[in-house]
Structures are given as structure tokens and as C-alpha cells.
Image (cartoon, rainbow, N blue to C red):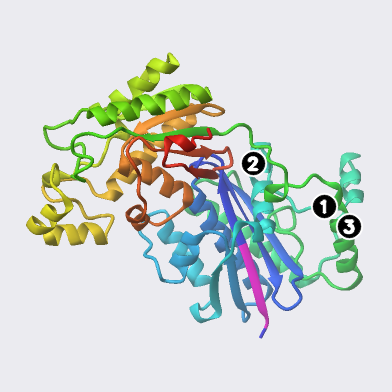
Amino acid sequence: MRTFVVEADGGSRGNPGPAGYGAVVLDATTGETLAETAEYIGVATNNVAEYKGLVAGLKAALALDPTASVRVRMDSKLVVEQMSGRWKIKHPDMKPLAAEAGRVFPRSSVSYEWIPRERNKHADRLANEAMDAGRQGRQWEPSRSRAEQATRDEGAARVVGDATAGAARARAALSRTAASTAALSGTGTGPAVPAGTGTAATAGRSGATALREERDTTAARAAAPARGWAAPADLGAPATFVLLRHGETALTPEKRFSGSGGAHDPELSPVGRRQADAVAAALAARGTVQEIVSSPLRRCRETAEAVATRLNLDVRIEEGLRETDFGAWEGLTFAEVQERYGADLDAWLSSPKAAPTGGGESFATVARRVSAARDRLVARSSGRTVLVVSHVTPIKTLVRLALGAPPESVFRMELAAASLSAVSYYTDGNASVRLFNDTAHLRT
């Protein structure tokens, strides 16, 4: 039985934004590239693009040998864990894609392995090529030799290698894959590309043709600029959010639940005001903040105003940045909630969908609200540094989402009052995180 390695990736320049996927099928023994596939899929999220890359990669392997065993390698922890059965698939956009991926090969024939992004450069490059092609209004096409490129530039007919019948079937199957995945999401960019014109590179070529094409492709790639993670960054200036938790209130040192519910909207304590002044001085010294956005709650507005006064900036309010509504738990300590509402607290700690007693917000609800606020801010902040003054849960959520970490990771983060972190959002949908948690270590 043959064994294939499928490496797949997807990306979204905006998340959601212009998106594409790439996948490569390798011979597990020799490491030889057997097939490539990539497609621009219109506006979608990173996760949708990653799943579509997986589906396309598996179907490419199926076209080569439906009896093979497959080892899937991806840098998406979410896809790997969900397809391995260790994480539940909850998002409605993911379920049909995961189901489609699960139907390509028998479950016993496929295994999944997470790999770091730097080991997934081939698929990442293909995904970026597909997104670049989509931006230019064309379909992705596999790499050509210099001679083929020159011939095309002169207006002559494109040279097509003498593919075997198996290669033709593989290209046709991959073309159908592109059409079916586009139809599934409604984000396709047009009719399916005919077999051999761009949805997949030649698969299963034989003899001298394979050696010639391998030599030509290697030469072309060496001459061409590097792309994806192998290339120098050319993504433009990111939108950078400097995340500032508000200063202390009277409730902070007592570790009481202090959200957005109830009638009490605490002000900064004397300690909190000193913290706000200190962080304002640190940010003024750096001089990089160009805009200030704040939660509507008083403790954040007071912290933001302290900075705004130093930087001579206005403060804009963003409702989506407010703290979680903790319902009946507002003002109580963890021990008091455990004593009075033990079962509800256990459920809340076990599931992001569980809400605090008395109609509070679940972490899932907060994540949707915060994600929408993030997307609004990123859309208008490209190349700018924005101070985002918010609370524990929204800031942890922004960090979690940037890292692609599971919801339960918010319980493993600690965020001090008046602490700073930073997330930079790039045009390809990726993000980088810097955690300072102390105004003395500010580097933005």
C-alpha cells in the first residue's frame, strides 16, 4: 500500500477577507512532490480556507491512489485537533467541510499531525500564490519553467507536458474539487477551470518528462522571488493594538467579579489613578500611539482619558470592548460564587457556552462581540497603532484569538491592572502577540 503525505494550508487577508488555500501531496518514502493544488476562494476566514485546503489535498491524494494511506500535516491546531476527534466542531461553517474531508478516505486510512508553520512552507506558498492570483483577477496556475513563461509572454501557445492518463484524471479530479469547494461556501470566483489549466500541477508524470519538469521547475523557483513564509515580509504596515487593561478599582484587589452587569460601574481607586498616570507617561515617552479606543465602562474611560490628556488625543468609545456581564455574580468573590452558585460555576468553567447565573454572558457570546469589534477596528486601522483600553476578558480573548488558542486558554492567563500587551494584525490574516503585563517593559 502506498503512503502519501498531504500538507495543506489556508489563509485570509483580513479574517474574514480575500482567502485562498494550498495543498501538496508528497510520496511518504521519497518526499517527491506528486501533486499540488491551490485556489482563491473569495472572502472567507482562515479556518474555512484551511479546511478547504485539507479537502482539496485529500482529493488530490485520492486521484493518485484511492487505496493509499494518508498522513495529513497542517499548522492549524484547530483543524488537526477537530479532525482527530479530540476537539468538538461547533462552528456551522466548519461542520460541512470537516464532514466532506472525513468522507474522502476511510477514517482508518488517514492520520493527522500538527506541524509548526515553518515546516508547512510549501502549502503556505501555494495558498499565498492563490490569493495573489485572486487579487489580480485570475486563477492560480502551477509554476512554469522559464522557457514556458517566455513562450507565453511572446503570445505563443502554452507548452503542456505529455502527461500520462493518470495525470489527466488527477487534474480533472482536482478541477472538480475546486468547483465543489467553491460551491459549498458560495465564495467561488467563477466556473471551474478546465483540467490541466490551473487547479492542480501535473501529477503522476513519467520518465524523462518528470525529470525535465522537475529541473525546469526548480530553476524557475530559484530565479523567482520567494513567496509565503520563505519571503521577506511585504504585507504592509500592520494594524497594531496596544491592549491596556484599566487601572485598579476598589474591587480589583479583592478579586471580585466586576463586569458590565448590574448597577455598579466602579471608578478608579487612588491606586488605579496612579497606575493610569504611569502608563500614560510610558506611552507618551514612546510616542507611537496614534488613536485611543475605550470600553464604555467608567474605569476604562478614566484610564483612557489619563493617556489621552498626555498624548493630546481624543477617546473613541467601542461598545464591543466592554467586560463580560457576570449576572448575579457581579461584586462577589470566586469563593462566594462557589458557595452560592456552585453548579453554575462548574458549568461556566467547563464550557464557553455556559453563562453566569442570572442571565450573564457566556465566553462564547463575549468572543463573538469582541471579534466583531476587532474586525471593525482592524478594517480602519491599517498601518496605525491604536491604544485599546478594555478589561480582562476582552483582552484575553483578543490574545487567544490571535494565537489560535482554544477557549479554555483564557483561564490560563493572568492580566494585571494597567498592564500592556500588543497584537499586530497583518493583511494576510496572521497576527503576532507581545505580552508585557507591566508598563515598565513597554516596547511599542
Of residues 221 and 251, the one nearer the viewer is 251
Taking 247 as reference, is 200 left or right?
right
Q: Main secondary structure of the magenta part?
A: strand
At 50% from the left and 45% from the top, the residue drawn is: 44
Which percent across, then down, holds residue 235?
64, 37
Read off the residue under disc 2. 134
Q: CA distance from mark 1 to mark 3?
A: 9 Å
> Which circle's residue, 3 or 2, is located before the other in the chain?
2
Amino acid identity at mark 3:
Asp
Magenta region: 2-7
From this viewpoint, which residue is outermost toward the top?
Answer: 312
Residue depth check, mark 1 versus mark 2: number of the one nearer the observer: 1
Of residues 411 and 362, the one nearer the viewer is 411
- Place residue 55 in its image quadrant: bottom right
Residue depth check, mark 1 versus mark 3: number of the one nearer the observer: 1
Taking 231 as reference, is 59 left or right?
left
Read off the residue under disc 3. 216
Q: Secondary structure at mark 1?
A: helix
Residue 13 visible in image: yes
Specify few, some or many for label 2: CA neighbours under 10 Å numbering under 14, 14-19, or 20 or more: many
Of residues 437 and 365, the one nearer the viewer is 437
Is 373 located above or below residue 355 in the figure?
above
Read off the residue under disc 1. 221
* Image quadrant occupied by the N terminus: bottom right
At 41% from the left and 49% from the top, the residue drawn is: 400
Q: CA distance from mark 1 to mark 2?
A: 20 Å
Mark 1 and 2 residues: CB-CB less than 8 Å, in contact?
Answer: no
Amino acid identity at mark 1:
Arg
Which percent across, then down, holds residue 107?
49, 78
At 52% from the left and 22% from the top, the residue drawn is: 287
